[in-house]
Image (cartoon, rainbow, N blue to C red):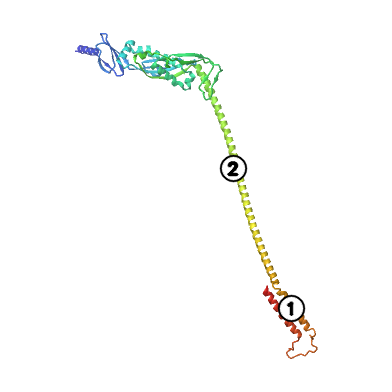
Amino acid sequence: MLIILGIMLMFINGLFFYSEAGYSYLVQYPTGKQIAELRPGYHLKWWGEVVPWKKVVTVKFVSNEEKEQDGQQYSGNRVTIPVRFNDAVKAELALSARFRLPENPDLFLKMALEFRHQDNLVNGSLIPSCMEIAKNSARLISAQEYIAGRGGELENAVLDQLAHGMYILDAEEMKPNGTDSIKSIDDSRTIENRTLVRYNVKKRTNSDGSIMRKKHPIAEYGIVVSQATVEDVNPEQRFKELLGKQRDAAAQASIEKERAKQAEYEKQRIIAEGEAAKASIKVNMEKEQITALITMETEKKREQVNVEKHKLELQSARLKAQEVKVLADAEAYKKKKVMQADGALEMKLQTFERVHSAYAQAIAGTQLVPTTYIGGGEGKGTPNAMDFINIATANMAKDLDVKIKQKN
């Protein structure tokens, strides 16, 4: 029974095989017919041979130390690729690339029949192609340019050549004429040294301007490059020493530049503070000048007001004086006119004079002092001529005085 069961299992195992996901298979029947089986699941093999192929193949170029640390098994695992940049600097390039095998049964069958096994494809085509393309890509730039930030160009060149074919390059040797030097602080990662030989490398082009390429063998089988990464570039020791010197010089130059900047900033600060102090002094002086001008203008205005006030007072005094003069002139004129009016005063004076003359003539022969004095009982006697003269004179003076006042 066990024998029969074993025979049945051998029969079934020889009749069918299981296709795993992520693999493609080359099936070779005993009759010599060969087919490609790309679908997962159980399939008939008719006691033929089944050769598995990974749908995605990874090729990795790393150092021995990293290979030991990684511990993973890839479809192709090699040490780093030795390359030379166009400035003759040697380096070890670490690269990883992923290839997707054809999904078309006819292309897969063609590839499988050509290489017979996946290891043959990896070792006989993919690895040599990656190495050749990596070396060709490194010739496009210099080591200085790579460390200065143009590493992406190297990676793009590798991917483009793996996918579409390798560039055909023309190189012209260029020897520097200058002495050993470091360019500048701002370009601190670029080294110029006459001991390094540089090549001017250009891509050869077709008549239509397209890049002339060497056809890649894997393109014939529909193999697609899904990824290509330059993981590391380790330049030779000579370049590292130059780079170290350059970095030291650049660091020192950067320090000196920073010191110069600080000195310049300090100078600018001192100048700015001096200008600020000058501006402050100028502002204060202008304030004082403005204050003095305002004070002078105020005094000037005050003096002008006082002058105007004095002018008004003088004018007022003159007007008053003129008024007094006019009044005095009017009064004098009035008195003059009163005295001149009709000659009344002069006539009265003349009359007064004639009256007194008449009185004097009248009493000329009259005895003013009685020869005989007889006292009366009450002291009253008969009026004499002197009494009459006194009375008449008083009346006339009174009359004259009253009338003059009335004229005035």
**Image disc number at residue 161:** none
Residue type pointed to by label 2: Val
Q: Is residue 151 left or right of residue 337?
A: left
> Residue at horizontal 32%, vertical 12%?
110
> Residue at horizontal 46%, vertical 13%?
170
Q: Is residue 314 left or right of residue 121?
A: right
Q: Is residue 14 left or right of residue 89?
A: left
Residue 393 placement: quadrant: bottom right
The residue carrying mark 2 is 283
Residue 340 in view (yes/no)? yes
The residue carrying mark 1 is 352
Name above or below for residue 282 compared with residue 109: below
Residue 225 or residue 83, whichever sits in front:
225
Residue type pointed to by label 1: Phe
Residue 3 or residue 90, whichever sits in front:
90
> Residue at horizontal 69%, vertical 70%?
337
SS assignment at label 1:
helix
Q: Position of residue 396 (x, y in %)?
A: 71, 79
Q: Earlier in the sequence, mark 2 or mark 1?
A: 2
Cα separation between marks 2 and 1: 96 Å
SS assignment at label 2:
helix
